[in-house]
Amino acid sequence: MAEIDNFLQDIESKYQQKNQQVSKVNHNQLDREQKKSNNSDIDSFISEIESQKKVTENQDITEDIVLEIEGKFQQKKSSNSLNSTSNKKDNLISEIESKFNQKQSQSKIDSDDIISDIEKQYKQKQSAHKSQKKSGIAENYISELVTSYHQKQKEINHNKKSENLEEIRQQELEKQRQEKLITRKAEVWLKNLDPYSDEGFWFEQFALSYPTKLEAAIEYLKALSSS
């Protein structure tokens, strides 16, 4: 703005100087015309023509000056406009570059964040997979131990049952053997018993409580064995 103001003041000063020169010339011309007013008509006519010519020349000079001033003003204005446009363009380019750099920087930050997040998730999955794998191995091992324990228990129970059955069988065999043995003893005892003796008479009374004398004799001999 300061340059434009100075330029306009310069134009105004030059214009005023030219107007002063034109006014001075016109004033001198009028003085000469007044002095020659008493001359002949031809001289007056010639003087008038010369005066008009000078006025016309002065006007042409003034117009040329004005045109020159206008041309310079337009050049100055165009130059200022170009400078302003250039400055705006430079500012716009700088702003675009700044935003682009910011976008690039932000894009890099976002990319780094994404990569870090992916690595973190991968490590978490790896850790979880290892934990699950270890947990699975432990669970399988425990399951195998439990299965083995149950199998052992079944075998033990089966063996116990087998032992019990064998023991029962042996006991039953022993009982049968004892029964046979006591039966034989009872048969022999009955055969040797004198029915008319005191023992024979007592046994006859005792045998009345049993289906047969053999069974009574077996019970009697068992009682004697246990006593």
Image (cartoon, rainbow, N blue to C red):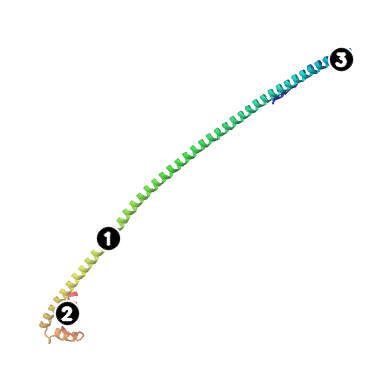
Q: Is residue 46 left or right of residue 6?
A: right
CA gap, disc 2 to disc 1?
A: 48 Å
Image quarter (top left, top right, bottom left or bottom right) of the N terminus: top right
* Residue ID at (14%, 85%): 200
* Residue ID at (65%, 28%): 81
The quarter of the displayed image where residue 194 is located: bottom left
Across and down, in percent, residue 131 comes to 37, 48
The dot on residue 213 is none
For numbered disc 3, what is the local secondary structure? helix
Residue 23 visible in this rendered orientation of the protein: no
Across and down, in percent, residue 157 comes to 26, 64
Report the amino acid beneath label 1: Gln
Q: Which residue extends farthest front?
A: 42
CA gap, disc 2 to disc 3?
A: 205 Å
Report the amino acid beneath label 2: Ile
Image quarter (top left, top right, bottom left or bottom right) of the C terminus: bottom left
Q: Is residue 54 left or right of residue 190?
A: right
Q: Which residue is mark 3?
A: 41
Neighbour tally class for label 3: few under 14, some 14-19, many 20 plus, Cα within 10 Å: few
Q: Which residue extends farthest right?
A: 38
The dot on residue 218 is 2
Q: Nearer the viewer, mark 2 or mark 1?
A: 1
Q: Which residue is mark 1?
A: 151
